Amino acid sequence: MSIPDDLLGERVIDAPGDMEELGRAIGRVLEPGDVVVLTGPLGAGKTTLTRGIGEGLGIRGPVQSPTFVIARTHPSLVGGTPLVHVDAYRLGAAVELDDLDIDVAGSAVIVEWGRGVAEYLADRWWEIEISRQVGGRGVDNACGEIAVHTVELDADAPRTVTISRRP
């Protein structure tokens, strides 16, 4: 488990470039056998973070969402750790990960939508949760009436990223 303590905790990421930079920092320290679970809503930045992780690892790209292929393997261009990028969203059950024949011991494995399936890959893993504001509720007029607001966020809207060890 190679992510250092200074990367643990919560931080606000202001733009996609900052998300990729965080990914590069994580990628530079990942080792074979590391499993990272990415959790967050659609459009939160999971693939953007993974793109940065790939750059930090020095892998062959491009890193794209593996939604329709379920898993992509990116070999290292620098003789380092390869990246396996998994999208667990379309898996019917966590045991379907076995069918993918992922080389966990020899790769850094990033699993998007992987909450609840990581324990099938490793005894310990890193969890990165990405959240963003998707609406609000509060008093917004002189009469004190409660109103519900729907906020459409663009790619540059801030995200909150929380990195933790599991279990």
Image (tube, helix red, strand yellow):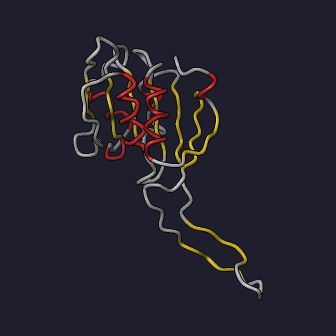
Q: Which residue corresponds to the image point at 37% horizontal and 14% vertical from the top-left?
A: 105
Residue 72: image quadrant is top left
Residue 48, position in %: x, y?
A: 39, 42
Q: Residue at x 29, y 14 (%)?
A: 78
Q: Would you say 119 lies left or right of 7 here?
A: left
Residue at the far left: name it: 69
Q: Position of residue 67 (x, y in %)?
A: 28, 45
Foreground pick, 160 / 71: 160
Residue at image point 60% right, 45% down: 12
Residue 139, placed above or below residue 118: below
The residue under the point 41% across, 25% down is 121
State the residue in front, 53 or 166: 53
Where's the C terminus, which quadrant? top right
Image mark count: 0
Q: Position of residue 36 (x, y in %)?
A: 46, 29
Quarter-of-image position of residue 3: top right
- Reply above or below: 88 against 7: below
